[in-house]
Image (cartoon, helix red, strand yellow):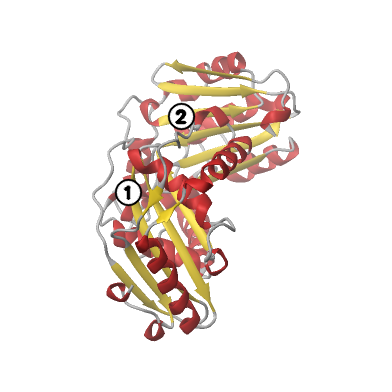
Amino acid sequence: MFSQTIKSQLIKQSVRRYTISSLESAGKTSTLAVKVHAGSRYADKDGLAHLLSRFNFQTTNDKSALRLVRESELLGGKLESTLDREFITLRATFLKENLPYYVDAIANVLYKTSFKPHELVESVAPAAGYDLAISQQNPITLAKEALYNSTYRTDLGKPLLFDGVEEITLDDIKEYANKVYTQENIEIEGFGINERDLQRLVSDSLINTLPKGSSLKVSETPKSFSGETRIRSQGTSVAAISIPVTKESIPEFEVLKAYLTSPVYELVDVIDTVSFEKFNNTHGLFSLYVKGSDASVVAKNIKEVVSSLKKGKDISIAKELAKVESELTNEKSILPENHEALKLDAVKNFKLGKFSYVALGDVSKLPYLDEL
């Protein structure tokens, strides 16, 4: 954990047109992450970012996908590419002495992925299909996707995963890679890595020869709406609400999350999940979920939760808890100091206003938005 590192030091500095942030520690392992502002919100077609993420660590001009994976395994390391609405993140975890290999490996992926037609058919598309199938088995994930779609009609409202509805070609993926894999559009983070070593290796790598472009990073809060979505399905029923959050309201919703998940809230036991996803520390989406096998019980519980929040709550009692949870989150992060300190002094009362609503499952027994 961060608190146990010896002589830890965070150093940030710009290298050419990208930024390197590195935290040195005394452990034996390191983590290197290249975060690209290329998540689903930036994709020209729905699912395009997902397919590009799945193309990472496939064949490059220098190595086959099989060779890359086997070399990494022999070194005891792990390579992965993950996707969210803001980032495609290429991440490697490895023994410290193998830093040069992993800087070179990720640089080659960014600069020299071959985009072989057969890999799209045989590897990338099936892997993307597997991701979709897994997500569709989780009712909370389905509800969250529907909340994003109801709250934002573009931008953050775009689907996270490729579902095959929109046709995407190999040329589309190549063009998107050329658009997002530029020096201005990436952030490099390291944990357990000497900053000067990382700076030198990156400067000597293909990352330094990536084309120049423009950052796609969005700081403005996207336009939001209050919508309703009803999804009829078998199994677990879910009722969920979401609220778009501006930069000024981030502290309030951090405290609200702590309040709703703590014993101080009288209905804590009926809420399954509370989520607060932030984007570039300037905006985000707050959501809460009630689920159960009996849709009638779910209906009763979501009505009680919404009613209590509409009456207003003094949530200031949860400010210290929010601070503790923030510190715990920082300790688990690659770069804790990248998280802005919460300014919670002014947080006191919360009263629920407009929100988006999703009913999933046995919707004939779940309330409509105007019934909440």
The mark that comes first in sequence, 1 or 2, is 1
Image height of 294 relative to 158, above or below: below
Name which residue lies at 49% across and 24% down: 206
**Dots 1 and 2: beta carbons under 8 Å?**
no
Is 350 or 272 nearer to us in this picture? 350
On-image quarter of the C terminus: bottom left
Image height of 157 relative to 113, above or below: below
Image height of 66 relative to 274, above or below: above
Q: Return the x and y of residue 55 as percentages of the image width and height.
A: 48, 47
Residue at mark 2:
187
Sort mark 2 into few (<14), some (14-19) or many (20+) by Cα contacts within 10 Å: some
Name which residue lies at 40% across and 85% down: 365
Q: CA distance from mark 1 to mark 2?
A: 24 Å
Element type at mark 2? strand
Query: What numbered label is drawn on residue 172?
Result: 1
Kind of residue at disc 1:
Asp
Query: What numbered label is drawn on residue 321?
Result: none
Q: Return the x and y of residue 104 as percentages of the image width and height.
A: 57, 27
Is 76 or 12 nearer to us in this picture? 12
Q: Quadrant of residue 219?
A: top left
Image height of 75 relative to 81, above or below: above
Is 211 or 134 nearer to us in this picture? 134
Kind of residue at disc 2:
Glu
